[in-house]
Amino acid sequence: MYAFQSRVRYSECDETGRLSLVAAVNYLQDASTFQSEELDRSFASLRERSIAWILANWRIEVGDLPRLGEQIVVSTWCYEMTRSHALRRFAIRDASGREIVRADSQWFVLDTASGHVTRVPDDQRIYLSDEPRGDMAPLERRLRFEGPGTPASPALVRAHNLDTNRHMNNAQYVLLAHDALEELGCAARPASVSVIYKKMALLGDVVVPVVHERADGCDVDLTSESGTTYALVRFDHRQEEA
């Protein structure tokens, strides 16, 4: 297991003074990135080999997000790795050690020259941990939305939305989906967020969020102007807000 300590910054808080959802997602990404750097498996070293790890889908379960100034510990561990994929868990714990955010995720290795998924190199098994998956709901592998949905305002992918792979950062899809819920008046603090990434959004692309309401939450189909899906995002509301 890899872990690092941090303190909730003002710039990471939402209007309630708590860690925002997108900031929490960024912390999870930071954990896997820092681990890669420490294990000498950085973006730069993978780029030299024309490969990159890409996130296919994840489920994020959200508890009581920490307030401004609170100490947190962010951790990650790979509990399964095959020749085709890797499964990685994440957690954010408060100062008492209570798990307040947890996530499960599936990753593939992309051959950046061909643009196709390729075999996981043997040297990547360095990530594999004996730590078990732990208690979480199943990882969503498929999401189906009901009805035509309601379009929200389109968003242009700008340079600040990109990551080092030159496509829109994983957390930005969650941010755009959540912004769409707020625009249509159906946002609520989620109990969980599931994301399935289908197509990379690149600089200059236009992303059109289409919101589908459910009895226990909301779904957002992030599409291109022609209707091709970039990502599917599911927000499950807390029981008291359903």
Image (tube, rainbow, N blue to C red):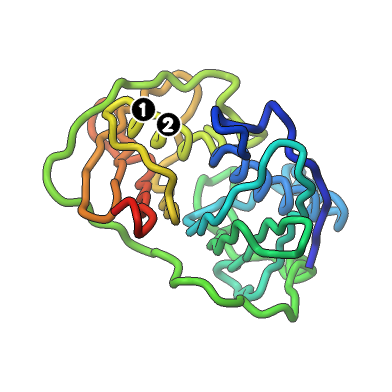
Crowding at mark 1 (Cα within 10 Å: few <14, some 14-19, many 20+): many
| 29 relative position to 145: left or right | right
Q: Whole-percent x and y of residue 24?
A: 61, 44
Question: Residue type at mark 2?
Answer: Leu
Q: Which residue is mark 2?
A: 176
Tell me what residue is drawn at x 50 percent, y 51 percent.
116
Q: Whole-percent x and y of residue 223?
A: 30, 34
Viewer-proximal residue among 83 and 211: 211
Viewer-proximal residue among 140 and 91: 91
Q: Earlier in the sequence, mark 1 or mark 2?
A: 2
Whether label 1 touches label 2, CB < 8 Å: yes
| 163 relative position to 181: left or right | right
How far is mark 1 from mark 2, CA to CA?
A: 9 Å
Look at the numbered disc 1 and give the secondary structure of its residue: strand
Q: Is residue 19 above or below residue 140?
A: above
Crowding at mark 2 (Cα within 10 Å: few <14, some 14-19, many 20+): many
Q: Which residue is mark 1?
A: 207
Question: Residue type at mark 1?
Answer: Val
Tell me what residue is drawn at x 53 percent, y 62 percent.
106
Q: Is residue 218 above or below residue 91?
A: above
